């Protein structure tokens, strides 16, 4: 991403791929050539793409390692479920699309609030300490959600903390999670959410605020000396990312008939992190591709059920070592590439940081 | 009396955390990496001891020793195969590799030992100690855990202060480049650190499963994360910090569960970590590093 | 009441040792920078002690001294990277006590760094645009939604960035990644970036380090040009005595955290204390 023009091309390619993929999926759906498992994966794939892109905003653009991204997703998911259930039971809102939109907005809002509350303490810390605190917050969110109960009585929403005895229709049942969720999520909504995410993230990156965020990542002290308030811009990236994760969470939650808080364990945060790292840190298109591939892969490998996680782990280690070890990289460089280098002499050496893409 | 009994249980659980945290903190101090697979080494150690006791009917001490030897070799192998090639890579790359290693160990365990939890047999059958005319009962296991913790602490402090290898470790942790120039074999020092950390993990695994006897492939992950938290809590990189952090964390967890809320026990632990880091951004005993402008 | 009276009775008044010099042309206007008894301790060691300096509105001033004398620490105190243990800093007459780096920057201080601190993954133009951050601004939502303000201000930023880059003839490098610039160009870019914040005092930390004599010559001319064009003051730390003696009007010599001499280039060159502590020993200049 150097010149304005190459940025424009990059953005167009990103949007183009997403739109093309959506059209292709729609065609395959109408032709009935998608397997049932693949159909079931469409909405989760959308959610994980949004999760990966939004986490990349924090890791790649803002340069902070967050290990609690699934926490925001779960806040969004359970907010969305409660809001949707409330609208249905209290106001008989049968229009699923409207309900979905409101639920997703509410999920994003609550996750954003959580982002503000968590960001204030977290963003004062640096490096590994910041990472461990985001991890801690992710665990706290899960733990707290385990204790939340919600029900609808008449038109009013009842919330209980550690108190399962609520009147009316139960929506959230503590550690047993959400009950009887209306499956109202649609693939189209997922597609639009991806588009929104891309517009927000790519436009943010190519704006004054985005440049400030990247400047802080590149050199905190220099950015401060140029008069850029560090906390404000770190918060901006963190909260934006939380809102997007919350919306993805709401969509995800409304795609299943049951959902327990235990679903959003630390492992889920790590999974999203793996998407981002394998897709290339700061590379939005990379995040989209790796989130898609790594969500489909386990389903494809279902026949090797016992070995698939093992294979996944080995692949993860091997990919990280091959893309990050200078000796192996030079060994793996194909003869063709060497020839290319011969012809293009005196090109500046590839930056080490650019070598992340898988 | 109930409070005292809770306190003792807390110290005992904290001692296990502390022993695990030592592995995290030593590796972090020297290799500057978050070794997420450490928690799973605990689980492997516990499984080895389980096999030795259950299937091969070995003496408990021999079983413990076997677990330690196996984990030591495992630690060295992991370091050599997965982490050494990434010595100069970004910390994120190393972190992801460590996570991959954690998945690998968990899934290998799943293949070998299956998903059904194993009931870990008590390692030593020690009688409980009664105090205050029977009002306070402390189990033998609890005492053993606390004693083991104290012995390990003293041994490690002496080791890093007195022996040549221990001094080399401190050098590498302060400044790897300078240590290398002084003729210290950095790779061997890091290997040794992993060896010690993993042997400690085996001990922790056996102690953990003696206290909480359900053993399954994911047994190590939560105590691993808690111990990691403990290491950060005490100031990551500091050996006494890991000790203090571990014990405090254990006590807070048990007391929180007893007096505040059972369901929120973990949340309380993590909340305390956050508060501590806000007051002291590098943990209780961590050194603040000033960026040179 | 009685307490107040008693306290005043114990106060002893002393004269302030202020023999500050500023260029004659700046006598009419307020000094851009004044420090009074500025000092900082690191664990009992006084890195800077009783540092008094006044810089005129359009003065080019020099801060020199042997390695480890505390020159960069002075910069860090002025720009609030460190909070002083004693003394005050006035920028354009405003006391900066309790301010942070960002607030100091908004008061009109901009600096470059001894060890170059560019935003290395960003382009040259983007680096300058970061300097323009508070000069030409629009909100986050204008940016995300691409509102009219976005297009208008982006254009302004682009034009102004190119104009600033043209000072050093760098407008053709606008799309190059900052880290791939040669060393001298990186130093020049840092100056442009600092200028973009519209400062009233530009702090340059060893601007000529790593430059060849020809580049240094050009830099000297450019510093004077910048001062003339923007009517700002410049305080620079430099080891290249040709540069310092060539363009600095007032010079302050620091050794072991203390000011050992202040004056014009001629006075400093002939000052026996300076020669002994610095020039004489290093056999330079």
Image (cartoon, coloured by chain):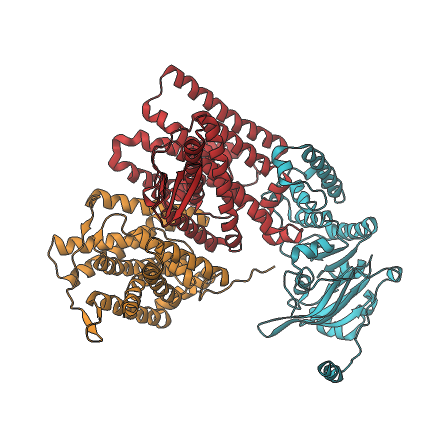
Chain colours: A red, B orange, C cyan
Q: Quadrant of residue B27?
A: bottom left
Q: Quadrant of residue C92?
A: bottom right
Q: Nearer the viewer, residue A354 or A18?
A: A18
Coordinates of residue C281 in the picture (x, y in percent): 70, 71
Q: Residue furthest left?
A: B57
Tally the numbered discs. 0
Up-down: is A290 above or below B259?
Answer: above
Coordinates of residue B84 in the picture (x, y in percent): 37, 51
Relative to C56, A84 lies left or right: left
Q: Residue furthest top?
A: A31
Q: Residue furthest front?
A: A154
Q: Which quadrant is the C terminus of chain A positioned in?
A: top left
Q: Which quadrant is the N terminus of chain A positioned in?
A: top right
Q: Nearer the viewer, residue B145 or C56?
A: B145
Relative to C272, A232 lies left or right: left
Residue for point 41% across, 54% down: B33
From this viewpoint, is residue A88 visible? Answer: yes
Coordinates of residue C12 in the picture (x, y in percent): 76, 82
Residue for point 30% across, 44% down: B104
Relative to A289, B12 lies left or right: left
From this viewpoint, is residue B187 visible? Answer: no
Relative to B234, B77 lies left or right: left
Coordinates of residue A148 in the picture (x, y in percent): 38, 46
């Amino acid at each position: 991403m150097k010149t304005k023009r190459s940025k424009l091309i990059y953005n167009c390619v990103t949007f183009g791929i997403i739109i093309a993929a959506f059209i292709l999926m729609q065609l395959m759906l109408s032709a009935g050539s998608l397997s049932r498992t693949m159909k079931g994966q469409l909405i989760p794939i959308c959610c994980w793409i949004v999760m990966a892109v939004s986490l990349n905003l924090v890791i790649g653009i803002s340069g902070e390692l967050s290990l609690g991204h699934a926490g925001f997703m779960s806040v969004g998911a359970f907010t969305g479920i409660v809001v949707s259930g409330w609208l249905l039971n209290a106001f008989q809102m049968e229009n699923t699309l409207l309900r979905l939109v409101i639920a997703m907005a509410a999920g994003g809002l609550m996750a954003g609030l959580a982002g503000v509350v968590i960001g204030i303490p977290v963003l004062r810390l640096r490096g590994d300490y910041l990472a461990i605190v985001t991890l801690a917050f992710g665990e706290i969110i899960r733990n707290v959600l385990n204790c939340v109960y919600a029900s609808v009585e008449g038109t009013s929403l009842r919330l209980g903390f550690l108190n399962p005895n609520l009147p009316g229709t139960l929506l959230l049942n503590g550690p047993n999670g959400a009950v009887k969720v209306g499956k109202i999520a649609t693939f189209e909504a997922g597609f639009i959410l991806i588009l929104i995410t891309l517009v927000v993230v790519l436009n943010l990156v190519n704006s004054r605020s985005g440049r400030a965020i990247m400047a802080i990542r590149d050199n905190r002290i220099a950015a401060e000396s140029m008069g850029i308030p560090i906390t404000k811009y770190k918060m901006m990236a963190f909260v934006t990312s939380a809102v997007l994760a919350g919306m993805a969470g709401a969509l995800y939650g409304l795609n299943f008939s049951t959902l327990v808080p235990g679903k959003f364990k630390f492992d889920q945060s790590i999974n999203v992190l793996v998407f981002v790292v394998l897709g290339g840190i700061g590379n939005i298109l990379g995040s989209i591709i790796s989130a898609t591939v790594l969500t489909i892969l386990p389903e494809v490998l279902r026949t090797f059920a016992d070995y698939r996680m093992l294979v996944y782990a080995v692949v993860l280690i091997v990919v990280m070592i091959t893309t990050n070890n200078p000796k192996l990289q030079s060994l793996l460089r194909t003869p063709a590439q060497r020839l290319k280098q011969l012809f293009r002499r005196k090109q500046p050496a590839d930056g080490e940081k650019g070598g992340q893409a898988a | 009396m109930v409070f005292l009994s809770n306190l003792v249980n807390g110290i005992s659980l904290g001692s296990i955390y502390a022993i695990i945290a030592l592995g995290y903190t030593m590796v972090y101090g020297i290799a500057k990496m978050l070794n997420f697979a450490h928690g799973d080494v605990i689980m492997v150690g516990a499984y080895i001891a389980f096999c030795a006791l259950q299937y091969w009917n070995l003496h408990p001490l021999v079983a413990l020793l076997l677990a330690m030897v196996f984990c030591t070799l495992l630690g060295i192998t992991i370091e050599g195969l997965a982490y050494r090639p990434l010595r100069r890579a970004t910390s994120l790359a190393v972190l992801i590799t460590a996570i991959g290693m954690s998945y690998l160990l968990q899934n290998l365990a799943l293949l070998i030992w299956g998903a059904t939890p194993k009931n870990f047999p008590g390692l030593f059958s020690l009688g409980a100690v009664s105090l205050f005319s029977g009002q306070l009962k402390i189990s033998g296991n609890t005492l053993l855990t606390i004693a083991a913790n104290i012995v390990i602490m003293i041994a490690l402090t002496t080791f890093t202060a007195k022996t040549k290898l221990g001094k080399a470790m401190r050098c590498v942790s302060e400044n790897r480049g300078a240590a290398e120039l002084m003729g210290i074999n950095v790779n061997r020092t890091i290997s040794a650190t992993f060896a010690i950390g993993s042997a400690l993990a085996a001990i922790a695994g056996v102690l953990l499963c003696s206290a909480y006897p359900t053993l399954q492939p994911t047994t190590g992950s939560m105590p691993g994360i808690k111990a990691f938290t403990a290491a950060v809590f005490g100031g990551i990189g500091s050996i006494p910090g890991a000790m203090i952090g571990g014990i405090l964390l254990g006590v807070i967890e048990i007391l929180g569960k007893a007096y505040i809320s059972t369901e929120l026990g973990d949340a309380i632990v993590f909340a305390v970590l956050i508060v501590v880091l806000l007051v002291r951004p590098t943990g209780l005993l961590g050194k603040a590093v000033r960026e040179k402008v | 009441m009685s307490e107040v009276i008693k306290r005043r009775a114990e106060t002893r008044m002393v004269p302030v040792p202020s023999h500050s010099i500023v260029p004659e042309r700046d006598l009419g206007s307020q000094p851009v920078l004044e420090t009074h008894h500025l000092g900082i301790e690191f664990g009992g060691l006084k890195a800077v002690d009783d540092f008094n300096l006044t810089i005129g509105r359009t003065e080019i001033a020099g801060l020199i001294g042997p390695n480890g004398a505390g020159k960069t620490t002075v910069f860090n105190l002025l720009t609030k990277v460190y909070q002083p243990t004693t003394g005050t800093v006035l920028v354009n007459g405003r006391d900066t006590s309790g301010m942070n780096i960002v607030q100091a920057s908004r008061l009109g201080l901009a600096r470059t760094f001894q060890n170059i601190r560019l935003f290395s993954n960003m382009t040259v133009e983007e680096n300058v645009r970061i300097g323009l951050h508070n000069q030409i601004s629009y909100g986050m939502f204008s940016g995300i939604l691409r509102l009219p303000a976005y297009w208008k201000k982006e254009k302004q930023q682009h034009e102004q960035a190119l104009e600033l880059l043209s000072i050093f003839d760098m407008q053709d490098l606008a799309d190059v990644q900052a880290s791939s610039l040669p060393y001298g160009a990186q130093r020049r870019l840092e100056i442009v970036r600092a200028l973009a914040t519209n400062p009233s005092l530009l702090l340059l930390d060893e601007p000529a380090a790593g430059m060849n004599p020809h580049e240094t010559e050009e830099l000297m001319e450019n510093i004077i040009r910048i001062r003339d064009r923007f009517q700002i003051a410049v305080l620079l730390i430099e080891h290249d005595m040709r540069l310092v003696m060539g363009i600095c009007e007032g010079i302050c010599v620091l050794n072991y955290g203390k000011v050992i001499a202040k004056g014009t280039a001629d006075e400093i060159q002939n000052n026996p204390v300076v020669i002994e502590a610095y020039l004489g020993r290093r056999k330079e200049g």
